[in-house]
Amino acid sequence: MASTPRASDKEFKDTYTQFLGGNAEMYGRHLVKLCVPSGNYMRLLGFGGQKVVILYQDEALDQRRLLHLLLPDAGYAEEERFFRSAKTLIRLDMEERRQGRIPPFSTVFWASKNPPFVCMEYIEGVTLRQYMEAQDLDLYSRLELLYRLAVGLDLVNSNNIIHRDIKPDNVIVDNSGMPRWIDFGIALFTRDNPLTRTDQPMGTPLYAAPEQLMDAANVTFKADIYSFGRLFYFVLTGDEAFDLEHLPLEAVGPYSQCVQDESHIDRRYASAGDYIADLEDNFDIQIAPNTPQPQAPTSLAQAVQRMAINTNVNPGKMMRYFGTDTGQWNRLLRSVKAEILKCFV
């Protein structure tokens, strides 16, 4: 059943049409305000599938965020996939944070169906392609990137999501060097009825599995494994020749097992988790999980506040107990800073 036009959408659709018609700077501000009253338009970041992505500044929160907007003519299937993706990422984000891990994708803040948009975290960083072009990484650093990406992919796949568009441009490496998956716009949610028509190709030809380029509706998680193999090659070599001779000897086996053709799908890794285990064995690596690193307090006052919070003590009461003379704090900090701060990190 197709979506029916809503009268309340008229202003939004008219503004959106003008925005897409080449008047982005003129109509962008109004378009963002219709969705996020506290948002100020910054720039159009690009088109992706059936949506556009706009960078805006949320003045109320003093943060840059992303506005994902469906195109005006997006159909029922695209709208369902759009919101299903947002709801799934919210759930996974909450689960990861409860475990004390950094989510391997952008955080979804909120969504609206009238007008249809999703507000997401803006990850400060560059695409994986840009990162590889700018950095001269040693083999271990490249493997660390791949390991973290595989952990994220395993999380997504194990929650019944097939990304279907794995490529260097759909990974952001943030300013701390952590890779994060983006753009689940054509993801397949295997628990629900498929929204993709049979025999419809999807994905980026250079990275998509052969079976996905023939029938994207009926692929399995092994399509993502194939695409990840291509990504594995790109990260290790910096190019897209996909020639085994360019790979380190230890990488030939894992790469080949990822990219078995459609007639030998059963020979591909069963999951990204199996790939991770092979990576650890072949290269003898152990990488810490994606957990945020604690920042050392920069003053004794901050150290005491952190101790109070961690022990469920009211920080204000603790500060009053120790005294609040700024000169005393600073003199004490200069004399014993290193030893005291170690106790509270």
Image: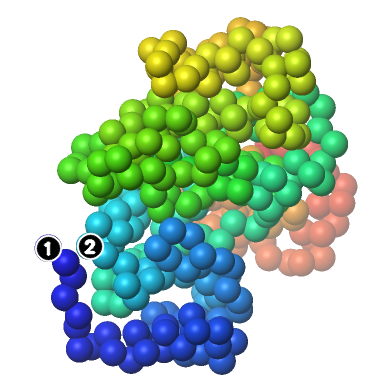
Q: Gap between marks 1 and 2, in whole Å?
A: 7 Å
Identified at 82% across, 46% down, the residue is 134
Identified at 60% across, 18% down, the residue is 255
Identified at 61% across, 76% down, the residue is 43
Residue linked to disc 2: 76
Front position in the image: 272 or 106: 272
Q: Residue 173's x, y, as percent?
A: 65, 46
> Which quadrant of the structure image shows residue 235?
top right
Residue linked to disc 1: 1
Contact flag, marks 1 and 2 (Cβ < 8 Å): yes
Of callouts 1 and 2, the N-terminal one: 1
Give the quarter of the figure containing the N terminus.
Answer: bottom left
For residue 335, above or below residue 80: above
Amino acid tagged 2: Tyr
Q: Residue 284's x, y, as percent?
A: 67, 10
Amino acid tagged 1: Met
User: Is residue 94 among what the camera can see?
Assistant: no
Give the numbered dot on residue 285. none
Q: Residue 223's x, y, as percent?
A: 42, 29
Q: Secondary structure at mark 1?
A: loop
* Colouring style: rainbow
For residue 69, above or below residue 308: below
Front position in the image: 223 or 295: 223
User: Is residue 75 among what the camera can see?
Assistant: yes
The reply, left or right, for residue 170 in relation to residue 211 is: right
Q: Residues within 10 Å of mark 1 (few under 14, many from 20)?
A: few
Give the quarter of the figure containing the C terminus.
Answer: top right
> Which quadrant of the structure image shows residue 229?
top right
Q: Secondary structure at mark 2?
A: helix
Q: Residue 275's x, y, as percent?
A: 52, 17
For residue 35, above or below residue 328: below
Identified at 35% across, 86% down, the residue is 12
